[in-house]
Image (cartoon, rainbow, N blue to C red):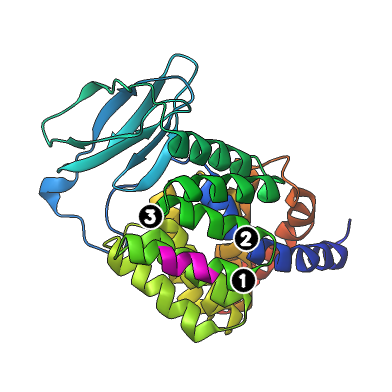
Amino acid sequence: MNADTGRMVLSMTRLRLSTLALVILVAAPPAFAQRRAGAPRPAAQAAARAVTVKTQPKAVVWVDEVRRGVTNDDGLLRLTLAPGRRSLRVRASGFAEHTRALLPSERGTITVALKPTTDEAELLFQQAEEAREKGGGAEKAAELYRQALKLRPRFAAAHVGLARALLARDDHDGALEQVEEARRDRPGYAEASVVEGRALRELADHDGALAAFTRALRESRGLNPEAHTGVGLVHEDKARHEEAVAAFRRAVAQLSDTEPVLYELLGRNYEKLERWKEAADAYDKYLQLAPEGSHASAIRSIIDQLRQQAAEQEQQTP
């Protein structure tokens, strides 16, 4: 594949990437950085601490409302956390969700004993989450969310889950209605604001989308890679590539090299800025993380050309 063909293939995938980037991030089990993006790191807070969450196998783990991953078959998930007090949330199918504080002094193994639940609304919600995250199950997930909401009408997480499922079916009005229901049940709900931003961006309401993503960052005190990615995509839509790069870099910092798609997003914005070396480096990182990825072949076909352009650019720069 030559460079021109590679660029054409990349261009054809970019619209799809922009649409799916937020979906990919929210379903991923990444290892998140704990420092607020863009904030300085004081020397006293430089040292991280390691903890291992021990609970049910295949349990989903959140820290400070940011999804950190899924426990292995032994029910273990190792995390690196910044100093300070944190909030730990764990959910496993068939068990009641549990939230607890992580004190600054806690290290090593943190055991979270989940209790089985017979709450039908909670069980239906868990089934809906599994159906949605597997991909291709938006219709089934939507029905399960609705069943859960019939049993528990004031269920903010189910409203947001239903909004995401409706977005996957291009039902933007329905998704926005569910966002309002979620916000009624839980004011200051950052995830609801993120979903609102996604819906408004897909409706080409860029100002409204940017306001929603910005609100989500305020509600989550800056720790929200999905919102940072949304901000970057809005800036990219408006050809504000410097701002897009800054937002994507914040998302990368919080996702700690677990999402190749972010490096593709960075690379294409660096290209628009004619920052060839940084574009090549970003694409290189994509290839390191996803050597067999769906865009790897197209990226390989242009990366040498970008490095050549970078070398010429350096020679011309005093």
Q: Quadrant of residue 309?
A: bottom right
Would you name the residue on which mark 3 appears? 154
Q: Is residue 263 left or right of residue 219?
A: right
Relative to residue 311, is residue 91 depicted above or below?
above
Q: Mark 2 touching mark 3, by CB under 8 A?
A: no
Numbered range of the magenta stretch: 176-181
Q: Secondary structure at mark 3?
A: loop
Residue 166 bears which disc, if any?
2
The earlier-in-sequence mark between 2 and 3 is: 3
Please provide percent x and percent y for residue 167.
62, 63
The earlier-in-sequence mark between 2 and 1 is: 2
Q: Amino acid at mark 1?
A: His
Is residue 179 found inside the magenta-colored segment of the image?
Answer: yes
Q: Nearer the viewer, mark 2 or mark 3?
A: 3
Q: Nearer the viewer, residue 175 or 40?
A: 175
Please provide percent x and percent y for residue 255.
44, 49
